[in-house]
Image: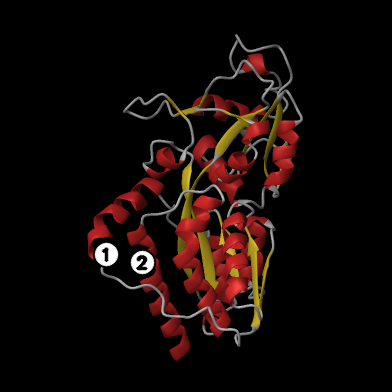
Amino acid sequence: MQTFSFKNYSAIILSCAALLTACNGGNQDSNNPDMAGNIHIDGSSTVYPITEAVAEEFRLEAGNVKVTVGVSGTGGGMKKFTRGEIDIVNASRSMNEAEASLAKENNITYIELPVAYDGLTVVVNPENNWVKDITVAELKKIWEPEAQGKIKKWNQIRPEWPDKEIHLYGAGVESGTYDYFTEAIVGKSHSSRGDYTASEDDNVLVQGVSTDPNALGFFGYAYYEENKAKLKVVPVDDENDANGKGAILPSLENVKNGSYAPLSRPLFIYVNSKAAVRPEVDSFVNFYLEAAAELSEEVGYIPMPAALYKEQLQKYKAFSEGAAKK
């Protein structure tokens, strides 16, 4: 399966924007007190804050609909989704070939909907006064499988850094964040050293880095934004960038314009076609796409251009109508 390209997707967004300004959004009315049912969502901890914020707003308008949002990582959520156990999966990467094959085996059809952008954020403890920036090559040296048991101290990364242990915190192997980080930094998805503190729950990683002066970790931008008082963000230098921008901080603008490379990425939800024919799910997805721009920014992520949300609404409408005819 072809890897989702943030830069290519941005180009598509810009090229189609003018054609989409006249498009209308979803036509489902969530403000229906008689609507009822259960919506089951699971998956990425990175996408969780957006989906939970949408669910909270949706519950106010459709009070008889119960929306549950779990956090088992993208990989864990995909296992449930491709077995038909949940209606929607939060994903911080595209579905991979193995997951698509399992979905096909189980007669699960679905739609992929991008909902926001994220910048994977590298952080250290605020007491760390030596790391001012870091390069992609240095991150690879720290995280590649060959580093296990060998790269143990800060001065092994840069000689001027102290002769102190380096303690690593990062996403667990079931996380789409782990997949994306390893592909972007190490060069191969699902490939890294194993001797680090791992969790699918980003709050665990925040807690670890914020209490460990020798820590270095990574997680989604929103978790840094929410906890910036107890974390220190590290600018990343993509030395392979021909334009030579130097070390770039993750920010709303830098992620949106693609200059924060290679750690900018899109975030997704996937919707099961059998779920999409249920009024409560159909209404929720339409509500999600209409509210995602505002709510993703509120929880610390980067909204997509308005034209792209309109495109996703039109795409989802065609999908749900098609599912209803089957």
Q: Is residue 88 above or below residue 189?
A: below
Who's the residue at 43% across and 53% down the image?
Answer: 4
| Residue placed most toward the observer, 134 or 32 | 32
Q: Amino acid at mark 2?
A: Lys
Residue 233 appears anywhere in the view? yes
Identify the amino acid type marked 1.
Answer: Thr
From this viewpoint, which residue is outermost toward the bottom?
A: 325
Determine whether label 2 and label 1 are within 8 Å by CB: yes
Q: The N terminus is located in which quarter?
A: bottom left
> Does dot 2 land on a helix, a strand or a loop?
helix
Q: CA distance from mark 2 to mark 1?
A: 8 Å
- For disc 1, the neighbor class at 10 Å (few under 14, some 14 to 19, many from 20) is few
Is residue 292 left or right of 55 when viewed as pictured?
A: left
| Residue 298 pos. (x, y %) | 53, 52
| Residue 144 image offset from top left, x and y in percent | 60, 32
Q: Position of residue 63 (x, y in %)?
A: 64, 78
**Residue 48 is drawn in which quadrant?**
bottom right
Image location of residue 180, percent across then percent down: 54, 46
Q: For mark 2, what is the residue?
A: 310
Tell me what residue is drawn at x 52 percent, y 57 percent: 295
- Badge 1 is on which residue? 21
Residue 121 is drawn in which quadrant?
A: top right
Q: Residue at x 68, y 32 (%)?
A: 230
